[in-house]
Image (cartoon, rainbow, N blue to C red):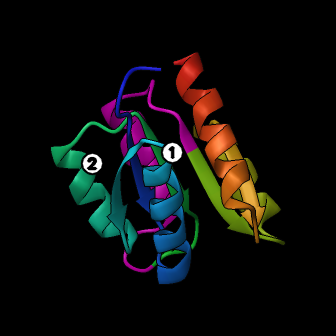
């Protein structure tokens, strides 16, 4: 892993977004956060994260739209999608569009850190 990887978190639930941000910063990552899909896409236009973690259900633009934007911009960037239980059909769509992994809510922040590190080491 190179030093100070940049993680973009797109999550509309403030508590989840903030918890992930604090956990990842504690692990040595730089973190950008977006509270909706539109904000995430705007951040992707001006930054090059090493990995993107996106919720599927968000205001303005959903996680599939964020995923689609990432894959058009830079297909090698890994994307982890977060989904509520019962969204299996959307998760399958996400994998078909190039998602690297998915995690069902509720989840452990430690699990996300492990999965992020694993995907960054691969890329």
Determine whether the residue tagged by mark 1 lies in a helix, strand or loop: loop
Read off the residue under disc 2.
44
| Residue in the picture at 46% in, 46% down | 52
- Can residue 21 be seen here? The reply is yes
Q: Residue furthest left?
A: 46
Which is more toward the observer, 94 or 114? 114
Q: Earlier in the sequence, mark 1 or mark 2?
A: 1
Mark 2 neighbour class, 10 Å CA radius: few under 14, some 14 to 19, many 20 or more: some
| Residue in the picture at 74% in, 61% down | 108
Q: Where is residue 106 drawn, in percent x and y?
A: 76, 71
Read off the residue under disc 1.
27
| Residue in the picture at 81% in, 60% down | 88
Mark 1 neighbour class, 10 Å CA radius: few under 14, some 14 to 19, many 20 or more: few
Residue 84 drawn above or below residue 42: below
Q: Where is residue 15 drawn, in percent x and y?
A: 53, 81
Q: Quadrant of residue 5?
A: top left
Q: Quadrant of residue 29?
A: top left
Span highlighted in magenta in the image: 59-79
Residue 14 left/right relative to 95: left
Q: Residue furthest front?
A: 26
Across the whole image, how many numbered discs are drawn on residues?
Answer: 2
């Amino acid at each position: 892993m190179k030093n100070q990887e940049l993680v973009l978190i797109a999550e509309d639930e403030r508590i989840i977004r903030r918890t992930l941000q604090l956990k990842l910063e504690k692990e040595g990552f730089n973190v950008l956060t977006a509270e909706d899909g539109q904000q995430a896409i705007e951040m992707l236009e001006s930054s090059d994260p090493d990995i993107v973690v996106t919720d599927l259900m968000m205001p303005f633009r959903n996680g599939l739209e964020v995923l689609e934007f990432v894959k058009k911009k830079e297909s090698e960037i890994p994307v982890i999608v977060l989904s509520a239980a019962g969204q299996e059909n959307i998760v399958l769509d996400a994998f078909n569009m190039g998602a690297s992994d998915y995690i069902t809510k509720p989840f452990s922040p430690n699990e996300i850190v492990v999965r992020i590190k694993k995907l960054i080491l691969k890329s």
